[in-house]
């Protein structure tokens, strides 16, 4: 059952611990919790649209080595995840991720000497 949004907001406005990590620094158990939160929030919104992606593809994209994460937890991330193979996803309050990359433009798709564009994924 999804927690009451008011309760989550109250928790987030209390003591929040922030960790800034590269995707490659995030332990698998924490990645799993991040994936669950992502999927709970975005799965239904993207279903049936061009944004819908297979889980394996989305995980590869989400945890690309160039991605940086800001992770908000109700306990210090190191303490809650270090001693266990299981990260309690209830301790995860939210996250933001950012990745700089390049993408083909319409011009680059049509012409060999076309221009690629710098993009930022948030």
Image (cartoon, helix red, strand yellow):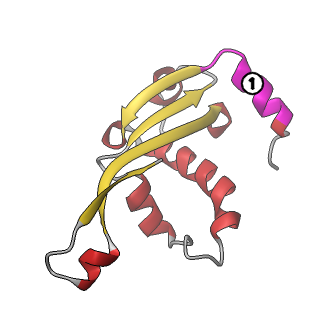
- Dot 1: what SS? helix
The secondary structure that most of the magenta stretch takes on is helix
Name the residue carrying label 1.
11
Q: Nearer the viewer, residue 109 or 76?
A: 109
Image quadrant of residue 118? bottom left
In this image, 5 relative to 55: left or right?
Answer: right
In the displayed image of the protein, which residue is found farthest to the left?
113
* Residue drawn at 52 percent across, 39 percent down: 96
12 w.r.t. 36: above or below: above
| Nearer the observer, 39 or 77 | 39
Q: In the image, what residue occupies the spot 38% across and 32% down?
A: 21
Q: Tell me where the magenta segment starts and ends, as one range.
A: 6-16
**Residue 94's x, y, as percent?**
61, 37
Across and down, in percent, residue 59 comes to: 44, 59
Q: Residues within 10 Å of mark 1 (few under 14, many from 20)?
A: some
Q: Residue furthest bottom?
A: 110
Whole-percent x, y for residue 78 in the image = 45, 23
- The one nearer the camera, 100 or 15, is 100
Q: Determine the image quadrant of residue 67.
A: top left
Percent position of residue 106, x then y: 34, 77
């Amino acid at each position: 059952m999804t927690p009451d949004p008011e309760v989550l907001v109250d928790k987030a406005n209390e003591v929040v611990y922030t960790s800034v990590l590269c995707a490659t620094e995030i332990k698998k158990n924490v990645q799993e919790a991040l994936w669950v939160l992502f999927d709970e929030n975005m799965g239904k919104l993207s279903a049936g649209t061009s944004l819908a992606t297979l889980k394996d593809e989305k995980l590869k994209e989400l945890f690309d080595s160039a991605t940086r994460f800001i992770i908000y937890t109700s306990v210090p991330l190191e303490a809650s995840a270090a001693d266990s193979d299981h990260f309690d996803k209830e301790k995860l309050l939210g996250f933001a991720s950012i990745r700089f990359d390049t993408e083909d433009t319409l011009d680059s798709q049509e012409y060999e000497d076309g221009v690629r564009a710098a993009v930022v994924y948030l």
